[in-house]
Image (cartoon, rainbow, N blue to C red):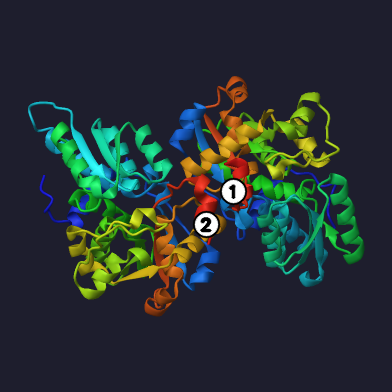
Amino acid sequence: MGTNREVNLETIKEASCTLSGHVIETPIQTCETLDLLAGRRLFFKCENFQRSGSFKFRGAFNAVSRLVSSNSNEPTKRQVHVVGCSSGNYACGLALAAKHHGVTAHVIMPNNCPECKKQAVLSYGANLLQREQKDFIPARKQVEDLTGAVFISSSQHPDVISGQGTMGLELLQQVPDLDAVIMPVGGGGMLAGVSMVIKSICPEVRVYGAEPEVANQAALSLRTGERRAFSHFPRSIADGLVCGIGEVTWTYIRDNVDDIFTVSEDEIKNAMRLVWERMKLVVEPSGVVGVAAVLCDSFKARAGGCKNVAVILSGGNVDVQKLPEILKM
Amino acid sequence: MEGNNNEVTLETVKKAASTLSDHVIRTPVQTCDTLDLLSGRRLFFKCENFQKSGSFKFRGACHALSRLVSANGTTPHRLQVVAGSTGNFACGLAMAAELFGVTAHVVMPNNSPECKRQTALSYGADLTLCEPTAQDIAQTVKQVQDVTGAVFISGGNNPDVISGHGTMGLELLRQVSNLDAVVMPVGTGGMLSGVSVAIKSICPEIRIYGAEPEVANDAAMSLSKGERCTFARFPQSIADGLNGNIGPVPWTYIQSYVDNIFTVSEDEIKNATRLVWEKMKLVVEPSGAVGVAAVLSDSFKAQAGGCRNVAVILSGGNVDLQVDKLSEFL
């Protein structure tokens, strides 16, 4: 399966069909308090309610589904294996998608990933390998050699990007008079897919990314016009966003994203507290980076004209025991 | 003036729905595969944690205030109201009062959650703290009344409050098809009485169940004995909103309309709260998850096992997010 296939409106619409009946068309919620703080109308897409607890399930399901379909043409019925590397949420999504299709999933996760994400992966029946982030690639190759597993990148695989893009289709249907959409960016799969949809259908709608200051690789890349890479993994409370954008997602982000806002660790914590206390939604720090961005001064300065802004709450997989520690500023 | 002799009927609940239509959120119903598996039936969760002021109490408070303002003829800003509350009714009343331009005084026990006090204050209510006993709350309320001339609005016994809460029953009937049963927490009984009147008047075959902490089982005992039982001292359940006694007015309706009240342990409540947080990604307070605890309990499976489609009201989500408070139930 070539990973240099294009992602476009067609592939995303196809993904939408594949996902129909399996992925939750998550609701949009509003909050008067946050509207007041932001100075505009906010429409929160609740991907914390998505199966496996984050939007990652969309891309994983689309990719596994297409792999299984393409394999069904083969005469010999071997057990299909897939392998993925992930700080957490993609591992959960891949494990659940694989379970659904009767495929064996191998997931490689960092040693310090949230306990709840490890437990979820195991509960979905996946094989879990924990490694230091620098050892991911050798571990992955080992799995590929031993099992013939197909590697599905958490953010660079076109089928994964197309799956994530389905959120853009839903948003356009769910929110009338949309001016802008903002979402967190780590590897860039969501931002690439959603921006492709929005710009293909309604190019006047602004598309914004939101990133921790300490992991601002995408923001720097967009500003300079050249993909930048960090030599090390930064540490952010937004544990899902410390991986940088890849070559594939960069091409779509460069062409379709209007701006990327960066926020401090405290701004992320403050946003998380607000969503928990005012909206009564369980979200993880990575999941509220878009909220932090829409409340920040630079958003008000550079995107102040946007009246109706959709904000994707990307996930809710957080260790609740660690919550007080996370919220401490 | 407060109509203590007024009945709660389907008509009064329908009127409340009309009054509230511009003010309350018609909260969504959510489902959860994991919880369906654990309970062995299909569950439909009514998310009153999303309600204005963070719990269903806003419904009753808003309707009662609305009627008071209409009946009184006084300009709203001259009207003062007072209520005693473990927390959520104070928040609901404060928010409704701000909406109508009325001054609200709330009396809360000194061990009530900080977030509930802060919420009441943020809506402009005047707050007085007292000892956590029914007697002290009543005395302090009387003191405030004497000083300010405020009208007392009972969070559990006022028929307009009960009718306001009953609107959840009407919504549930529209939102969930083939409903077999509804389970909800019970403290003073305002929600249980209102919802049971609404539902039994329209679909008497639907079972109505209350859910209560074992340590605060006055409503369950009352139902099994056939007469109202109360605790002299407030129990100390982690479900802080349910430590109050079942009121005399709700009791008359509960006695007639409620099929059973299930009690659950503190651990069951904590477990249910964690499950809702982790699996449904909803912030609920322990009191708010007592219905979930009930529907997962062995006694529910034994006594209500035939119910396939069960609505569970998640009554509120006002919980303190500080270390010491969270660790109590995490």
Residue at 52 percent of width and 41 percent of height: B276
Residue at 77 percent of width and 48 percent of height: B159
Classify mark 2: residues with Cα within 10 Å, few (<14), some (14-19) or many (20+). some
Secondary element at image label 2: helix
Residue B43, compared with residue B241, is above or below; it is: above
Callout 2 amino acid: Leu
Which residue is label 2 attached to?
A327
- View extreme (left): residue: A75
Secondary element at image label 1: helix
Q: Position of residue B308 (x, y in %)?
A: 51, 27
Q: Position of residue B251 (x, y in %)?
A: 79, 36
- Location of residue A96 by image quarter: top left
- View extreme (top): residue: B302
Q: Is residue A166 visible?
A: yes
Label annotation for residue A190: none
Q: Position of residue A130 (x, y in %)?
A: 31, 40
Q: Is residue B30 visible?
A: no
Is residue B251 found left or right of B307 in the rendered image?
right
Callout 1 amino acid: Glu
Is residue A216 found left or right of A64 in the rendered image?
right
Mark 2 or mark 1, which is nearer to you?
Answer: 2
How many marks overall?
2
Q: CA distance from mark 2 to mark 1?
A: 25 Å
Chain to which the residue tagged by mark 2 belongs = A
Q: Position of residue B320 (x, y in %)?
A: 62, 52
Is residue A37 found left or right of A47 in the rendered image?
right
Which residue is label 1 attached to?
B48
Residue A305, compared with residue A176, is above or below; it is: below
The N terminus of chain B, quarter of image: bottom right
